[in-house]
Image (tube, helix red, strand yellow):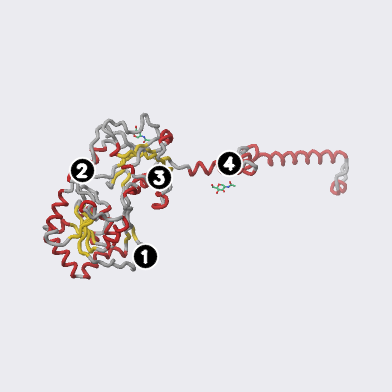
Amino acid sequence: MFDDRKMSKGCSAPGCRSILTVAVVVSLSLFFFFWTLPLTYCPPQLPQFNQLSDGQHEEKNNSIAEETVEKPVLLLWVWPENYRFDLSDCKTIYNIDGCHLTDDRALYSSSDAVLVFHKAIRWDLSTLPPSPRPSFQKWIWLNVESPTNTQKIPGIENLFNLTLSYREDADIPVRLRLTGNKTPNEDFKIPKKDKLVCWIVSNNAAHTGVGRRNAYYNELKKHVNIHLFGKAYGTFLDYKDYYPTIASCKFYLSFENSIHKDYITEKFNGPLSAGTVPVVLGPPRKNYERFAPGDAFIHVDDFPDAKSLAEYLMQLDRDEDAYRRYFNWRRHFSARPHLIVQNQEFVLAICTACDHVARHKEYQEAHDIYEWFFN
Ligand SMILES: *[C@@H]1O[C@H](CO)[C@@H](O)[C@H](O)[C@H]1NC(C)=O
Ligand SMILES: *[C@@H]1O[C@H](CO)[C@@H](O)[C@H](O)[C@H]1NC(C)=O
């Protein structure tokens, strides 16, 4: 018979001991089973953590970092007009650093994009990069001239992936834009003026389309005195004198050599950044107003003829308040000076391309580029 007291007091009988042993073994093995369960279900995670915490750590880290910051290679096939500049200018001048910009043709087969300068393409196409090109590579049509000054070399209409131009509807539009001021700028003072109307003319070759601007100038100069500077008029202006000269004039003739949509060049940016009122001749006023406030400039089309424009300029010369109103925009927007040294003519275009390829990896083709550009 069972001794209730003994049972409740402890477990000392041999039968009781063996039951206890079995219970301990069973619960221990259950414990180990469940403890090891997560390990058997997710084995791949642990070795990974282990690798990161052992001696290979540094190597692993570096190779991951390299993968994430690898920059696309942008190859400059030729230097436009042979104007060479320091390739690090993109970083130092525009803070553009997203691509590996190079002129080393040995990198052709690994280049993500190739810049092809339109003017340097020969009519037999022998100066193009070699075909077939790598399947991942994009060719960029680099042309910052207007249609009047662009040769229609046949055979390249469907070769490119991206167009680069001053045109706003190019794949890569190139232009210095005004920028907004977060806090209104109250510090601007109109520079000291000792001339009324100025014009710097470096190119006057008739074939570049300068006919209209010369006709207008010839009419305008009959009614108002115009100070001329520049190669075309025998008074070469030193680079360092460019901005001070423009700043010393109340008005500057921002006359484009040829008239095309969006063809609004540094001739407009010069006076805006120097503190002078541009008098523009180019595409319609509406086109200019895409890039600058309407009260920042005077358009020749605002007047029936050159004589009435001249009269208006002389009237503003006498009316300080009215003249000052042409600078109201400066409270809210800033213009930055463009590069003027000849060798830097293409820096902005090339750096803008670098910025673009760093941000866009998508597949793209540019078809019938002449259809787009000339019409
Ligand atoms: C890991 O990579 C980062 C980014 O490149 C670097 O700054 C850091 O020094 C690296 N650390 C080690 C331990 O290598
Ligand atoms: C670039 O354009 C060419 C010609 O249209 C096309 O054959 C090629 O596949 C394009 N490549 C990329 C990467 O977009």
Query: Residue placed at 27% from the left, 65% from the top?
Result: 328
Which residue shows up at 36% across the image and 29% down it?
131
Q: Distance between the residues labelled 1 and 4?
A: 46 Å
Tell me: 198 left or right of 14: left
Q: Residues within 10 Å of mark 4 (few under 14, many from 20)?
A: few
- Tag 4 or tag 2, which sits nearer the N-term? 4
Question: Ligand 1: does it lie within 8 Å of the C-beta at label 1?
Answer: no
Q: Which residue is labeled 3 in the image? A: 359
Asked whether disc 2 touches disc 4, contact meaning CB atoms under 8 Å apart, the reply is no
Q: Mark 2 points at which residue?
A: 148
Res. 295 image quadrant? bottom left
Secondary structure beneath dot 3 equals helix
Give the residue type that dot 2 points to. Answer: Thr
Q: How far separated are the C-alphas under marks 3 and 2?
A: 32 Å
Residue position for label 1: 183
Along the line of sight, which residue is nearer the eye, 370 or 320?
320
| Labels 4 and 3: the sequence-earlier one | 4
Marks 2 and 4 sit apart, C-alpha to C-alpha, by 56 Å
N-terminal-most mark, 1 or 4: 4
Q: Is residue 62 left or right of residue 55?
A: left
The spot of residue 241 in percent (x, y) is 30, 58
Residue position marked by numbered label 4 in the rendering: 60
Name the residue: 79% across, 38% down: 22
User: Of the residues shown, which amino acid type is indicated by label 1?
Assistant: Thr
- When asked about the image quadrant of residue 357, the answer is top left
Identify which residue is drawn at 60% across, 44% down.
Answer: 58
> Relative to residue 91, is residue 15 depicted above or below?
above
